Image: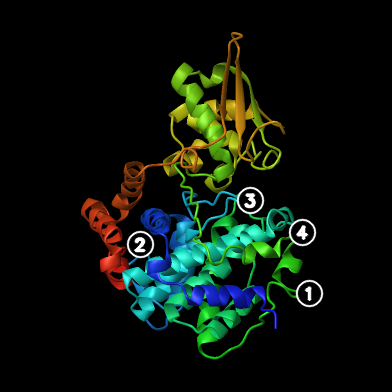
Amino acid sequence: MTQTSAERVAQHFHDFSYARVPVATRDAVKRLLLDYLGVGLSGSQSESGRIAREFAKTQGGVEQATVIGGNMRVPAVLASFANAISAHSIELDDIDVLALFHFSPPVFSAALAVGEAVGASGEALITALAAGCEMMERVSRAANSSLRNRGFHTTPTTGVFGATIAAAYLMKLTPDQIVSALGLAGAQACGLMEMYGPSMQKRFNPGPAARNGVTAATMASLGFTGAATIFDGERGFLRAFTDKHDARALTEGLDAPYELLIEFKPYSCARPIHNAIDCALTIRKQHKPDLMAIRRIVMERHPDWAHYHQNKTPATYHEAQVSLPYSVAVALEEGAALFAQYRDDKLKQPGLLHAMDVIEIVANDTLPRGVSCRMTMEMNDGSSYVAQVDDPKGSIGNPMNNDELRIKFDSLAMPVIGADGARRLADAVAGIESSDVASLMGLTMR
């Protein structure tokens, strides 16, 4: 009998082991673990992170897992939910190369919560994180770009499967139980791109994905069965969420080492905006333009993203973080685009308002990459400045090195847990294979 896609990947991830994870993938996962914890700590102190922590606190239940940036332990489903929201609350979380989704909020939040609850070792955690990220990316490759174009948010809709696999590995489920867990994950797949605006909507999306992954694995461990045809079936995930898909991507190369490509964010905004920020920073460094003396800015973007992030009048910092005009303007003004640059009290500054108003976004299908940007700035005195960026800082083609990632981590973690706490947490990540999840997560408390 022909196996379904869920049955094939279930066996693959059941047989996973630390020794089977390529060294390059282990290193990538550990780099991302450090980044996730820094972003999660900072995000836990944001408005949306605070509310998520408060929600977890008020629900009660068995103390199984740590809520990052708080001083409490709650059931694993609640910790995964709150931590995923915190990790997505300041727009500094990681991205993949194809769909620009975020691995860590759903996958890492689920794995850390379950790992702490079951007493998992550091090696088991690294293995589970690698497995969850691979599963999430396989589903995205099978479903995108149709999934995104239909209005579904890739991070939660594919992330629930990654979270499920990470949790299932740490719970030591059987292959049949993993199949059921994937079916139950598909029943809970959700997340819409109707999330841009002044609200916190976007921050919420990874929360259910992490929580639902933990729920799916837990229910399967108790004997609840799920559909083995969740991906391939007539009404399965791929047919329901896409107009065009490639189911082969779910199972291609299962016997070969999987190359996990993770990109990191140096700027606190939506990833497709980063190229535009790099253009702005290049022109600022070379010419230091006066914002009020700018006549026009033409921002050429690849058609993949040309019609996104166009808001010139953001009303809250949530909107500003998905606004290319604001991000370019504040980068030109301040030479940075970190969370400190995205504050409600900056949104009405005259120079920023003027720069936003004169930006024109146009599509250019000759640009080489989906996120490529070419920026032309015309000044009132007739001078003109041009910059083009195809590989933004933090990408595979223009990576952040370990020192840069540590600087980012320290800048995010130190205000929450202090300099000594940040140092101890970074050291714990570096030596995680010789430790355990509970010891690591204890260091994330305030």
Q: Name the residue under label 4.
A: 244
Front in this rendered view, residue 276 or 73: 276
Amino acid beneath label 4: Lys
**CB under 8 Å between discs 1 and 4:** no
Q: Are marks 1 and 3 in contact (CB under 8 Å)?
A: no
Query: Does label 2 or label 3 sit earlier along the sequence?
Result: 2
Going from the N terminus, do you reach mark 2 or mark 1 first? 2
N-terminal of the pair, mark 1 or mark 3, is: 3
Mark 2 vs mark 4, CA separation in Å: 41 Å
Quadrant position of the N terminus in the picture? bottom right
Furthest-left residue in view? 420
**Could you tell me which residue is drawn at 71 percent across and 61 percent down?**
246
Residue drawn at x 48%, y 55% as measured from the top left: 89
Q: Do the residues labelled 2 and 3 touch (CB within 8 Å)?
A: no
Q: Is residue 67 visible?
A: no
- The percent position of residue 445, horizontal first and vertical second, equals 30, 65
Residue ID for mark 1: 234
Q: Is mark 4 on a helix, strand or loop?
A: loop
**Which three-letter amino acid code belongs to the residue tagged 2?**
Gly
Q: Is residue 86 left or right of residue 96?
A: left
Whichever of labels 2 and 4 marks the residue nearer the N terminus, that label is 2
At label 3, which amino acid type do we have?
Tyr
Mark 3: few, some, or many residues within 10 Å (few <14, many ≥20)? some
Q: Which of marks 2 and 1 is in front?
A: 1
Q: Nearer the viewer, residue 248 or 28?
A: 248
The circle on residue 196 is 3
> Sequence order check: which comes first, mark 1 or mark 4?
1
